[in-house]
Image (cartoon, grey):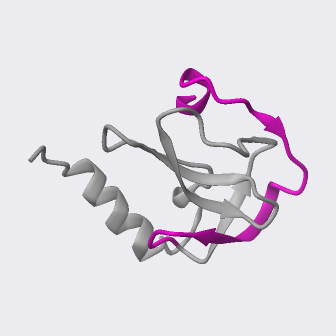
């Protein structure tokens, strides 16, 4: 929703439903995530930075450059146990304090 609202273009993808795949990333993410989506972005919309991608180039995580908002394409709540990196990242996002 965030990406579409920002003017991004969704592209239909194959192999992203009821599966797991590795992330290539620049941030502290789990190495492997679950996947339950048929659509993705391959380019970040204006004002967003790519944080993680699947091997096929589909964007799996991105953030708004001007605010502490992130979009994750996987579902951390479906993993048991939860990945510690997802928990820590969520806590940082919810405790955001403007400097």
Single out the residue that lies furthest toward the front: 46
15 or 44, nearer to the observer:
44
Query: At which x and y percent is residue 44?
Result: 61, 42
Query: At which x and y percent is residue 19?
Result: 80, 64
Is residue 12 toward the left or the right of residue 89 in the image? right
76 part of magenta stretch: no
Residue at 66%, 60% (x, y): give it. 53
Is residue 17 toward the left or the right of residue 34 in the image? right
Say above or below: 53 vs 39. below
15 part of magenta stretch: yes
Say above or below: 58 vs 9. below
Residue at 57%, 67% (x, y): give it. 79
Which image quadrant for residue 66?
Answer: top left
Image quadrant in which the N terminus is located:
top right
Residue at 78%, 67% (x, y): give it. 55
Say above or below: 20 vs 75. below
Query: At which x and y percent is residue 96?
Result: 19, 49
Which image quadrant for residue 22?
Answer: bottom right
Residue at 58%, 32% (x, y): give it. 3
22 or 25, nearer to the observer:
25
Count of numbered circles on the image: 0
Residue range in magenta is 1-29
């Amino acid at each position: 929703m965030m990406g579409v609202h920002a003017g991004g273009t969704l592209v239909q993808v194959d192999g992203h439903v009821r599966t797991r795949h590795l992330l290539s990333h620049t941030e502290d993410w789990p190495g492997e995530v679950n996947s339950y989506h048929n659509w993705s972005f391959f380019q970040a919309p204006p004002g967003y930075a790519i944080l993680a991608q699947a091997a096929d180039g589909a964007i799996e995580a991105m953030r708004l450059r001007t605010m502490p908002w992130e979009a994750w394409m996987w579902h951390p709540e479906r993993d048991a146990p939860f990945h510690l990196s997802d928990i820590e990242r969520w806590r940082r996002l919810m405790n955001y304090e403007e400097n």
